[in-house]
Image (cartoon, helix red, strand yellow):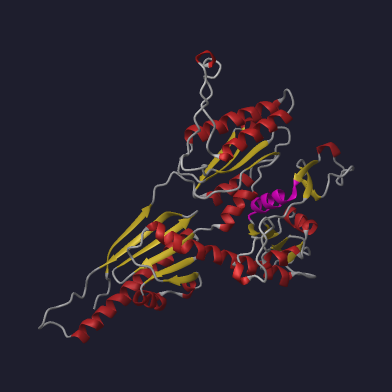
Amino acid sequence: MATDPIQRMRERVHETALDLDAQLVLAELAALPPSQDVPYVTVSLDWRPEGSDPGRTPPPDIRPSERRSHRDNDGVSRRPARQQLDRDLAEAIAQQGPRGAGLESLTADAERIATYLDEELDPSAQGVFLVSCAAAAVFAPLALGLPIPTRVSVGPTPALSVLARLVDDHPTYAVLLADQHEATLSFVTQAIRGQSVTLDSTDYPRKQKQGGWSQRRFQARADERVAAFARGIAEETQRALDELGVEMLILAGDEVITSALDAAFLQSVKDRIISTLRLDIGAAEQEVIAATLPLAQAAEREREVEAVQAMSDAVGAGGNAVIGPEATIMAVQGGQVAMLLITDDFAAAGWADYSFPLLGVGAPPAAHSAGGDPKAIVPVDLEEELIRLTLLNGGDVQIVKTASALAAVDLDEIPVAGLEPPRSATAAALDAFGGVGALVRFSVDGQLENALP
């Protein structure tokens, strides 16, 4: 019997110029101190080019007499996001006034951002997210494997909702592609394989010519080898999943090995399997990602459903949930929030005095509720502060997708072109609570609760 059929194991970190550790960077950005006098610039860009050429359009033809005045004209970027960025930064600089530390910092930010985009960013990036504040020596760029909405924000804290949504919508997941002789466990982040582990088995038992083992004996030994190989795969899979903290696993391969793996996996691994599908062991990397990415996204939608249901069930006296903007901002400030739940289109006005710190809902009040200087109160985007403070205090952010995933054949009526897409049932359920709420670590009376579902 083959007790250890694993002949070789290869671990590999796949080289990429893209930043796949967005979750870690998100936490670091949330910890940056507020800066009211000199603002942070937060930029998110859909960096896909218009057409097939990522370069620039040629400059217009000019007469020889005009060449001196046009020597710096090198054309217009074919990336629409770059053109919008230039316009938005120019407007933000103009709003800073004719002089001051804010103007100097923002002007330096614009120059540093342009240098990064033109000279440092890898052309394979589909999206860009960065936070900059020259006065505070902050420049944190991320080259991303997926596009994100194009936005420019200038404010006392980084605007993290776009990056938080990318992290939430595309968590790292694992794909185990196996047959009876080989298995590859790949970890996919932002539709890119970042790490993998490959295991090769021996060929034992080899088929014999006439006069060798009987077919029955051969099949018994082959089954033993497959079962032993499956146990080796299962052990390595559990080790890697636990080491990287990955909670979603997709199993792909032929029926023989997937059945053997089902028998070999511990329950802690089975609980992470979100789907099983048939794929050939020779499938290309992009083919594997194309087949599995929609499954991971569907699993994320299911987690949103479970989280909103858990919050709904926990609402009430002494419960471990809060709902609505007012209660949620209080819980966030108190460090209570274990998981923030917010729709991806939630928007509300808020205010903050970062010197206390103190935040509230609505327009800035005329009088300071804590006896401070009313001039220190500034308007803020409430959704950004809810997300930032949740991350700062170690909580999770669950951004609920509002667009329905239903196909047109599943709807009572075909949506009219130009109108908003149908709203998902999960978002509608959260809308009933004001579009935002939270599962909390402890209730207001101080009793500890297990808030997570």
Q: Is residue 70 left or right of residue 351?
A: left
The residue sitting at the right extreme is 367
Q: Could you tell me residue 124's position as x and y percent?
A: 45, 44
Q: In which quarter of the image is the C terminus?
A: bottom right
Q: Residue at x 69, y 27 (%)?
A: 103
The mark tally for this picture is: 0
Specify whether residue 312 is in view.
Answer: yes
Q: Is residue 393 magenta?
A: yes
Q: Which residue is drawn at 53% across and 31% down?
A: 115
Q: State whether residue 122 is above or below residue 362.
A: above
Specify whether residue 453 is in view.
Answer: no
Q: In this view, does 68 lie to the left or right of 17?
A: right
Q: Which residue is drawn at 53% across and 13% down?
A: 65
The residue sitting at the left extreme is 211
Q: State whether residue 343 is above or below residue 48.
A: below
Q: Does the magenta stretch include residue 156?
A: no
Residue 206 quadrant: bottom left
Q: In which quarter of the image is the N terminus?
A: bottom left
Q: Could you tell me residue 150's position as x and y percent?
A: 61, 44
Q: Magenta stretch: give its range.
A: 381-394
Q: State whether residue 428 is above or below residue 79.
A: below
Q: What type of secondary structure mainly makes up the magenta span? A: helix
Q: Which residue is drawn at 78% across and 48% down?
A: 349
The residue sitting at the top extreme is 65
Q: Could you tell me residue 14's position as x and y percent?
A: 39, 51
Residue 302 quadrant: bottom right
Residue 177 quadrant: bottom left
Q: Could you tell me residue 415's position as x and y percent?
A: 66, 63
